[in-house]
Amino acid sequence: MMRQAGRYMAAYRKLSEKYPGFRLRSETTDLIVEISLQPWKAFQPDGVIIFSDILTPLPAIGIDFEIDENKGPIIEHTIQTEDDLSCLQKIDLDKLHFVGESLSILRKEVRAVCLLTSTFYRYDMHVFGNLILRIHLHTYTLLH
């Protein structure tokens, strides 16, 4: 049995009030760990799903974005053509340090059989979909 980080939980909503930015919550090691552990502590499932987002790797390849709490993700410079791909940079794993740090802490905390990353299909990102999934999976693999 698995439980994803539960946005419906009172503990998550309270933490969201204290730390209102989604990116702050999903890119800060201590917050990632705390949010990821909330459902685990409440339900004791077999594993934990790390609190993350499919967009997490974007800044590491040179694409900045914001997440509006009401509208969702906002990417100012989207990739619409093949020429737009030239703005992409080689992935900078230092910009994703919080993923590896969070996974290490969670692994120690829960000693779970199963530790998964994120939900990959939260947003339909036009051309980005496949690229982000591959980058996220590659990042996940490198951090293990």
Image (cartoon, helix red, strand yellow):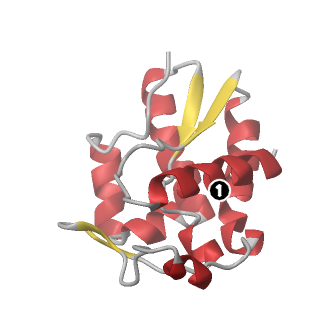
Q: Which residue is mark 1?
A: 135
Q: Give the answer, above or below, for where 5 lies relative to 55.
A: above
- The amino acid type of the residue labelled 1 equals Ile
Would you call the spot at circle 1 few (<14 residues within 10 Å), some (14-19), or many (20 or more)? some
Q: Is residue 96 left or right of residue 24?
A: right
Task: Indicate the position of residue 36 as horizontal and vertical percent values.
Answer: 52, 43
Q: 8 or 83: which is nearer to us?
A: 83
Q: Residue at x 50, y 49 (%)?
A: 51
Q: Is residue 143 visible?
A: no
Q: Is residue 37 left or right of residue 89?
A: left
Q: Give the answer, above or below, for where 39 lies relative to 136.
A: above
Instruction: Examine the image and state in which quarter residue 69 appears.
Output: bottom left
Label 1: element kind: helix
Q: 123 or 70: which is nearer to us?
A: 123
Q: Is residue 74 visible?
A: yes
Q: 64 or 27: which is nearer to us?
A: 64
Task: Indicate the position of residue 16 as horizontal and vertical percent values.
Answer: 33, 61
Task: Indicate the position of residue 121 as horizontal and vertical percent values.
Answer: 41, 43
Q: Is residue 57 left or right of residue 38?
A: right
Quarter placement of the C terminus = top right
Task: Indicate the position of residue 70 as horizontal and vertical percent values.
Answer: 17, 66
Q: Give the answer, above or below, for where 22 lies relative to 62.
A: above
Q: Residue at x 19, y 67 (%)?
A: 71
Q: Residue at x 52, y 81 (%)?
A: 83
Instruction: Examine the image and state in which quarter residue 76 appears.
Output: bottom left
Q: Give the answer, above or below, for where 72 lies relative to 44.
A: below
Q: 32 or 10: which is nearer to us?
A: 32
State the count of labels: 1
Q: Residue furthest left?
A: 70
Q: Residue furthest front?
A: 82
